[in-house]
Structure formats: structure tokens, C-alpha cells
Image (spheres, rainbow, N blue to C red):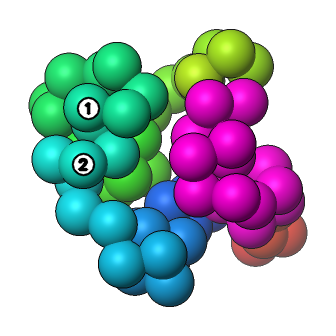
Amino acid sequence: MAIIVNLDVMMAKRKMSLNELSEKVGLTLSNLSILKTGKAKAIRFSTLNLICKILECQPSDILEFKND
């Protein structure tokens, strides 16, 4: 079982760069990059809430469950 992070897909759909999202969310580039590449172990709901608000999407647009 795995959680797939589709943040890069949503950023591409919204034509938003990692730098721009980083500034708007208030996360460092390195932390946002860790999340984007799927290497993050956790995410705060407040961070997920801000990302969804800025990208105008739902959490399910960013996080996906895949059953191996």
C-alpha cells in the first residue's frame, strides 16, 4: 500500500512553479520539494489546507492511495 503525491500534477495544471507555491504556502523550497517528490513521511492538515486553497483543489487531487 502506498500514498502517491500528485502535487506536481496539480501545480502543472495551475501553471504554478515550486518557488511561487513555496512563497504562498510559507514552506521552504526544500520541504515543499520533499513533499512534491513523495519522500515526505507526513503532512500537517494546515499545510494541506493551504496548498488546496492556493491550488483550488481537493486533498484527493494531491494525495492518492494505491494498493500494491
Which residue does the numbered mark 1 point to in the structure image?
23
Residue 48 position within the rendered picture, expressed as x and y whole percent measured from the top left: 66, 32
* Amino acid type, label 1: Glu
Q: Nearer the viewer, residue 7 or 65?
A: 7
Q: Report the label total.
A: 2
Residue at point 68%, 42% (across, down): 53
Residue 57 left/right relative to 12: right
Q: Is residue 58 magenta?
A: yes
Q: Report if residue 63 is visible in the image.
A: no
Residue at point 38%, 52% (across, down): 36
Q: Nearer the viewer, residue 9 or 34?
A: 9
Q: Provide the secondary structure element on which disc 1 rests.
A: helix
Residue 36 left/right relative to 33: right
Residue 6 position within the rendered picture, expressed as x and y whole percent measured from the top left: 56, 67
Up the image or down, 28 lies above or below 1; here it is above
Q: Which residues are magenta?
A: 48-62
Which residue does the numbered mark 2 point to in the structure image?
20
Residue 49 position within the rendered picture, expressed as x and y whole percent measured from the top left: 72, 30
Residue 57 position within the rendered picture, expressed as x and y whole percent measured from the top left: 75, 61
Are dots 1 and 2 in contact, CB under 8 Å? yes
* Amino acid type, label 2: Glu
Residue at point 42%, 28% (across, down): 25
Check disc 1: other Cα within 10 Å, few if <14, some if 14-19, many if 20+: few
Which quadrant would residue 66 be assigned to in this image? bottom right
Q: CA distance from mark 1 to mark 2?
A: 5 Å
Q: Is residue 16 magenta?
A: no
Q: Main secondary structure of the magenta part?
A: helix
